[in-house]
Amino acid sequence: MRVLINGGGVAGLTLAFWLRRHGIEPVVVERAAHGRLGGYGIDFFGTGYDVAARMGIVDRLAPHRLPVDSVDFVDAAGRPGARLTAPLLDKVIQGPHLALMHTTLEGALLDAVEGDVEIRFGETVTAVRDTGSAVEAEFAGGTTERFDLLVGADGIHSRTRELAFGPEPEFARYLGCRLACFPVADRYDWGRARVHYTEPGRQVVVYPTGRTGELIALFLFRSSHTGNVPRAERPGLLRSTFGGMGWLTPSLLAEAPADEPIFMDTMTQIVMPAWHRGRVALVGDACGCMTMVSAQGVSMAMAGAYVLAEELARHGDHVGAFTRYQERVRAEVAHRQRNAQMFIRTLVPGTRPGLVAQSLIQRLIMREAFAPLLRRQFGASSFLPPQNPEPRQGVIHGDR
C-alpha cells in the first residue's frame, strides 16, 4: 500500500515514520525546497512528547531545549509583575516537557526518516481525484500518480483540505488576533527568561533561541482583518500597530528584517464535521488547528499522526481506520480548542481595565497553590495507552 502525504512538517514526517514502521509505504511531498523549518518556539509535552519518546528522538531534542527558566510579565520599565518559574511549571505539567525551537523538532523528525522514506521537496499537490479504488494526484511539476490513500498534513491553510473538502472559510474559526515573529540580536541581557509586555490590544514577547546572541521577537495584536497580509506590507503593519508602544518595542521593530519575509498569520482554529472523505484524510493543523495559545498544537499533530498510522495498520480497510482515528483524536483536539478560546480572551486584553484585571490575576495565580487551576487550563497528559513492546508490522490487506 502506498500513502501520499501532502506536507513535510511535524504531522507529515511523524505519520511517514510510523507508516513505515507498520510496513506501509509513505511518499511525502513538501512544497518548500528543503523542509518547513519554522523559526519560533514551541512548548513540547503531553502526547507529543510521548510519541517522540516512542520514536527514540527525545535524546536528540533534549540538548537543544531553550534556555528559559521563567516566564516574566513586565511593565513598561521592564519590572516583573508576575513570574511563572520552572518549579511551578513542573507542578502544572506534571510530566516531562521541553521548550524547543520548531526547527529543532522538524530537524529531528527529518533525521528519523532520512533514507527510509521518499520525500519530494519543492513539490505539492494541485488536483485530486478519488476514483473509489485509488486517489489520482496531480502535482505542480505536471505529473499525475495513483496512490491508495492521500493524507493532507499541510497545515492550517491546507491545499489538500481545499481540494477534497472545501474552501478554508467553511472551517475557519478566527479568534480575533494576529501574530508575527522574527529573530533579533540579544542586546537586552534578559538572561534565561521569556518576557511578556502587554498594552491594550497588543503584546510583545521575547525569548532566547539557544543560539548565542539571538532572541525571537513575537508580536500579538487584536485585529478584525482575517485575510492574508502580503509579505511586503507586514513590516509596515507592525510599525503602525505597535507604534508608540513602551518597553523595548521601538528597538525590536527597528530590527524587523528588510530582506527576509516576516512570519505573520491569524490566530485561527480549524473545525470540521469530518476529517476524512473517501480515500482522503487530514491530520494535524489541517483538520484541527488549535493555535499557539493552546500550547498543544505540535503535540496533537504528532498524536494524530501516530494514531492514524496505528489505525491504518490495525484495520483491513481505510474506512474503518479513518473512522477510528477520528473517534480517538477529535475529542482531545476539541477540548484543547475550547481551552484556547477561553484563554485568548484574556491573553491580549482590549481595554485598560482589562489589562489591570489581567495583571492582578497573574500576580494571584502564579504560585504553587494555584497549580491545579493552571493544570486544568494548560496541562495535558498523554492520552495514548501504554506502548506495546514492539509496533505491529504489517500491511493493510484488501485495500487496493
Image: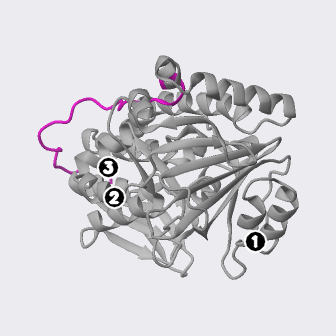
**Dot 3 amino acid type:** Asp
Specify the quadrant that holds the C terminus: bottom left
Q: Residues within 10 Å of mark 3 (few under 14, many from 20)?
A: some
Is residue 53 shown left or right of residue 349? left
Query: Can residue 162 be found in the magenta stretch?
Result: no
Whole-number angstrom distance, CA of label 3 to CA of label 1: 57 Å
Along the line of sight, which residue is nearer the eye, 400 or 239?
239
**Which residue sits at x=80%, y=62%?**
238
Q: Residues within 10 Å of mark 1 (few under 14, many from 20)?
A: few
Q: Residues in magenta?
A: 375-400
Disc ID at residue 399? 3
> Under tag 3, what secondary structure?
loop
Q: Nearer the viewer, mark 1 or mark 2?
A: 1
Q: Which secondary structure type mostly characterizes the magenta part of the structure? A: loop
Whole-number angstrom distance, CA of label 1 to CA of label 2: 41 Å
Q: Which residue is the site of mark 2? A: 16
